[in-house]
Image: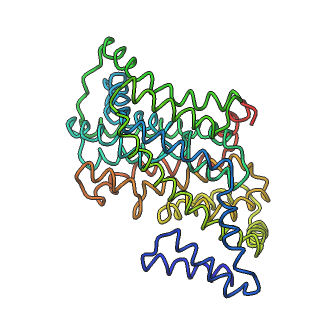
Amino acid sequence: MSILLFAGVFFAMLIIGIPIAFAVGLAALAHVLILLPHLSLDILPQQMFAGADSFALTAIPFFILIGELMNAGGISRRLVDFARAVVGRLQGGLGIVSLLSSMIFASFSGSSVANAASTGSVTIPAMLRGRYSRADAASIESASSGLGAVLPPSIPMIVYGSIGGVSVGGLFVGGYVPAVLLSLGLMVLIILKARRQGIPLDEPGTPRQIISTAFDAFPALMTPFIIMGGILGGVMTPTESGAVGAAYAALIALFWYREMRLSDLPKILLNTAATTGVVMLIMTIAALFSWIMAFERLPAQAAEFLLSGISSQWVLMLGIVLFLLIVGMFIDTISALIILTPVLLPIALAASIDPLFFGVIVCLALSLGAVTPPVGVVLFVTASIAETSVENVSKAMLPFLAVLCGGTMLMALTPELILWLPRLFGY
């Protein structure tokens, strides 16, 4: 009864156009007023505050700020130039440039939409000049940007780690192997499509161009090493590494590349505050839902129900991944994590599934929603840059989605593929 009431109110709010954060809040309020009338309403703001009262969450504004600084400082163009000089001579080289640029940018922005908007504004026009169709250019950039959720510093991983009590540093390290394997799969697909469509080879970069672009991009490429080096070396927490990374990004944007002025900082900080505010609003309101689920013992009941009928970890993981892929089509990654982690994590723990491995898979599966119709925000961004329809981009995305979804399913069945690297670093 309780879950049906919440789901009914929640989806009714979404249908009439209420933003998801307020839809969750109204559904939680309706649940308390109707099914838990004996509780004092004072507990609601207390639980909302508790949802934001986590040291791990203080890393989020710093990583958002890094992405804003890099975007304003002309970093994305330099990353694209470097990648193009290195791999431009390959068949489908421009597509691979888009993939590598997005991965590099993701390693210090943690946002799929930021990746698509920044690197896409450079790589999509370049691919169009290289005789890629508009739909193919947008779909390649969309697929590349979809890997942002598993490349550190990943904001979804910070959210999952905060809610689930899992090491954020361990999640960061665990995201590397899936990102590399999926990017290799996308790379092969890009090359095959380029050969089939007769895409001409790009001009090969000369050794002098490679050295020049590498020198120009080197300060930017150092950002993820500074962030992850501090975490893995035990010198800094994720929050501290985010603060150091933001300070470093500001310094190179202001004094090395000199494409950003001090007068630009207020706008950058305002954008950072606005994005952080949206994330934290969702966190605080969805904390009500998490508390209600725990109060009603719904996660425990769901675990008992599922485990009584499913004896195989493989079947359970495949079912969860399929469920998350569907959810990701309609709800953004962070909102879905906040709502579903308190429900799904106890089920995974009851089935003896490693919480770190589970977190990487959950973030990966949900992140595919950002590049999947009908809601996929990234598709709208790349379609706008390529000046084509979302429908055309969606059709061109199907082979890439097959690689991403198939790879996610495969990794969901092989925990050691993800866990060996975090264990190597002591997580």
Residue at (31% x, 29% y) in the render: 91
Q: Is residue 37 above or below residue 106?
A: below
How are the colours assigned in the image? rainbow
In this view, the residue farthest toward the top is 208
Residue at (70% x, 46% y) in the render: 356
* Image spot of residue 116 (x, y percent): 38, 46
Q: Quadrant of residue 260?
A: top left
Residue at (69% x, 65% y) in the render: 343
Quarter of the image where the C terminus is located:
top right
Res 207 seen here: yes
Residue at (75% x, 61% y) in the render: 346
* Image spot of residue 360 (x, y percent): 62, 47
Q: Which residue is more in the foreground, 322 or 225?
A: 225
* Image spot of residue 48 (x, y percent): 65, 66
Quarter of the image where the N terminus is located:
bottom right
Q: Which residue is more in the foreground, 13 or 416?
A: 13
* Image spot of residue 184 (x, y percent): 48, 35
Q: Is residue 193 above or below residue 367?
A: above
Q: Quadrant of residue 220?
A: top left
The mark total stands at 0
Q: Is residue 55 left or right of residue 198?
A: right
Res 191 seen here: no
Q: Is residue 190 above or below residue 330?
A: above
Q: Quadrant of residue 125?
A: top left
